Image (cartoon, rainbow, N blue to C red):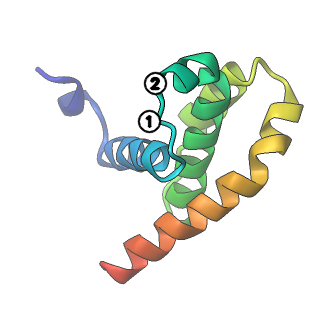
Amino acid sequence: MTLAENLTVEQAAKTLIHETAHIELHHIDDVDQYHAHRGRMEVEAESVAYIVAGLSRFDTSAYSIGYITGWADEDVTVIRDTAARVLKTAHTISEILEHHE
């Protein structure tokens, strides 16, 4: 049994959005930078996924909120400081998804 077989459809979709966010946010362009700032980058990617999933009418808060706060070390400043990038990327991904519906 693979990991994907254990995920709900919504969770699998959210995970794909999360990974797409990493690409759109250029997190994978420099592996050293990713490792140096992994917490911030995970906060950004999961925040994007949470927003886009919500716009697609499925709630991932049971998983996403804990994931985001964990990577932010419960520091609200990290979440606030990433908000503009998160919202811009969520908007970009949402437009892509709407265009392909």
Residue at far right of view:
77
Q: Secondary structure at mark 2?
A: helix
Residue at 58%, 36% in the rendered image: 64
| Residue type for callout 1 | Ile
Relative to 34, say whether 99 is above or below. Answer: below
Relative to 57, say whether 17 is above or below. Answer: above
Along the line of sight, the residue nearer the viewer: 100 or 36? 36
In the image: residue 45, left or right of residue 9: right
Residue at 29%, 34% in the rendered image: 7
Q: Residues within 10 Å of mark 2 (few under 14, many from 20)?
A: few
Location of the C terminus (image quadrant): bottom left
Find residue 99 and report its horizontal and vertical position in percent: 37, 82
Find residue 23 and report its horizontal and vertical position in percent: 43, 47
Tell me the tag on residue 31.
2
Which residue is label 1 attached to? Answer: 28
| Residues at marks 1 and 2 touching, judged by CB atoms closer than 8 Å | yes
- Quadrant hosting residue 79: top right
Along the line of sight, the residue nearer the viewer: 61 or 39? 39
Along the line of sight, the residue nearer the viewer: 54 or 81? 81
